Image: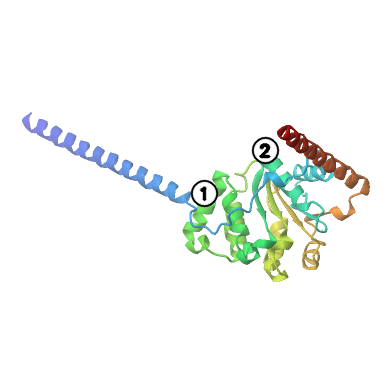
Amino acid sequence: MFETQIAVTDYNNALDELMQQYRDRAVRDIHVNVHRVLEDLNLDGMVYAADVGLKTTKKCLDGTRKEVLQEIVDWIHDPDINAPRIMWLHGQAGKGKSAIAHTIALWSKNVGELGSCFCFARDRQTERLENKMLSTIARDLANPTFRRALARAIEDDNTLRTTTDVMQQWEKLLLGPLSKISSGMVGNIVLVIDALDESGVDLSRKHILSMLTSTEAASLPSNFRILLTSRPLSDIVTALRDARHVKETSLDNVPAMLTQHDIRLYVSKEVKGFRALVRGKLRISL
C-alpha cells in the first residue's frame, strides 16, 4: 500500500512537471507569435516619398467639372469584371487635371476606397520620385491582409525594403502580395497618380509606363482602379494610347459651353471673396 502511494505521488509529480512544461511552451509560443505579428507589420525603413499625397486645397471648385467627375466615378464603380483597370486623363497645361485628381482622391477617401494618391511635381524632379512611387503606394495600402503579405515579402527579402528598382517594386511589393490575397481585399481600391509628365525626362517614367501597359496591369483584381493624369507627351501617348485596358479621356475635347460654365462659377466665387474683403476693410477704416 505504501509503495502504491509512492508510485501515485511520483506519477502526480511527473504529470505536474509535464503540465508546467506545456504551460511554459505555450507562453513561449505566444511570445514568439506576438513578436512575429509585430515584425510582420513593421514596414519601417521602406522607401517612401513624403508629402506627395492628397491635398484638399487643390480639389475642384464645388459645382465644376461635374461631367468628367461623374464619368470617373461611374468607371470606378463599373461592375463589369472586364472594365479597364486604368483611366488616363490627359490635357494641356491648365486644363484642371490635378484638380480633378485631388477631387477624386478626396471623394475616394470619404467613401473608404482610396488606396493611395501619388502626385509628381516639376520642382521635385531632383528627388527621383519615380523610384519611390510604387513602394509608397504599397505602404499606403492599409488593408491588413495586404499589409501582412507585404511584410512577409520583405521578411523573405530584406533588400526590398530599400530598393529603388521600379520593376522589383512592381513585381514583389505589389503583384506578389496581391496574388496571395486575391480574395481578401473587399470593395473598390482607387489609386491616383497625378502629373506623371512632371516626373522628368522620358527616361524617368520609362519603367512606370512599361508597368502600366503590362499584361499584369491589365489583369489586376477587378476592384482595382488606377486614375492617371498627365499632359499628352509623346512617350506617354505612344505607351498608353493603344493599351486595351486603358480608358482614355481628354480634357482638350471638353465642350466650350461646359468650360464657360466652370469659368463663370470660378469668377463668381472670386468676386464674392473680393467683395467680402473690401467690406471688411471698409469696416476697419470706419
Number of residues whose C-alpha sits closer than 10 Å to that of mark 2, classed few (under 14), some (14–19) or many (20 or more): few
The tag earlier along the polypeptide, 2 or 1, is 2
Depth order, front residue of 10/261: 261
Task: Give me the residue at 32% from left, 41% from top.
Answer: 27
Residue for badge 2: 110
Q: Nearer the viewer, mark 2 or mark 1?
A: 2
Q: Position of residue 229 (x, y in %)?
A: 75, 55
Residue for badge 1: 148
Depth order, front residue of 109/264: 264
Query: From the viewer's perspective, is 67 left or right of 205?
Result: right
Q: Position of residue 212 (x, y in %)?
A: 71, 60
C-alpha distance separating marks 2 and 1: 24 Å
Q: Position of residue 85 (x, y in %)?
A: 74, 52
Query: From the viewer's perspective, is 184 left or right of 63?
Result: left
Depth order, front residue of 273/84: 273
Q: Position of residue 112 (x, y in %)?
A: 65, 39
